[in-house]
Image (cartoon, grey):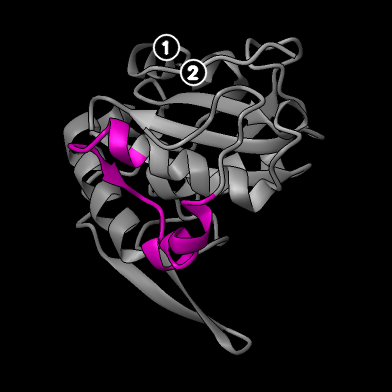
Amino acid sequence: MQTYKLNEENNLSNFVSINKVINYVPAKYIPNWDGSFNKIKSGKSFYFRPNKEFSTYNINIINNNPLRLDEKSEGIYIILSDKFNFFYVGKTVAKIKQRLHSHIQKLTSTNNNRYTTPLKWQKLAFNRYNVLKEDSVKLDDLKIKFYHLSEYSSCKIDELENNIYLKYKALLPKYMSLNDPKALESGLTHYKKVTCTDKGIGHP
């Protein structure tokens, strides 16, 4: 397998519009939202959900998409918005549709009575809602990239996730990371010693 060092240019140019990867039917746009969230108790847990009327949306993975994604894909994905200067690094083991469905709920501030919206995502969602207005339920500002785990045989998926998170944190210093730093950075001392070289992923 060919190995090469990825530089900043091709790291960022290999993103594609999320609209080329998923078919998406948006939720209803709800005007005059004040940015508030309701704290909902379910069982022993609490969930923060937009204080809006109920609405739903649908997504499906497009066959033969540019990222070679399907519902069984395993690896690391990055969601990026240049318009709002944020990125998110996530991992999936045959659950990419569910993962993207969850992120879309947060970013579009849709109240579908599912998931929870952390504070960092709440602030971004309200800003995005105010700037885009009716288009806030669309995904035109979002790009995505995927690292297939099968192409990085020297890494476990958690190691690959941490390596990629570190790389994009360094490549995009002016962008906000939507990741929970406690979840990813707690293992940085260990992961700084790990380099996934099959496709050139290392620390910049």
- Residue positioned 55% across, 24% down in the render: 200
Number of numbered discs overlaid on the protein picture: 2
Q: Which residue is identified by label 1? A: 10
Instruction: Tell me if 34 is positioned left or right of 18 in this view.
Output: left
Vertically, is 8 above or below 81?
A: above
Q: Secondary structure at mark 2?
A: loop
User: How many neighbours does mark 2 have within 10 angstroms: few (below 14), some (14-19), or many (20 or more)?
Assistant: few
- Residue positioned 70% across, 31% down in the render: 152
Task: Inspect the image, locate mark 2, and give the three-letter code of the amino acid beneath it.
Answer: Lys
- Residue positioned 18% across, 40% down in the render: 130
Question: Is any atom of residue 140 visible in this view?
Answer: yes
Residue 180 is covered by the magenta coloring: yes
- Image x and y of residue 179, in percent: 41, 53
- Residue positioned 48% across, 65% down in the render: 183
Task: Point out which mark residue 42 bears.
Answer: none
Residue 61 sits in quarter: top right
Quarter of the image for the N terminus: give it: top right
Badge 2 or badge 1: first in the primary sequence = 2
In magenta, the rendered stretch is 169-193
Residue 41 is covered by the magenta coloring: no
Q: Which residue is identified by label 2? A: 5
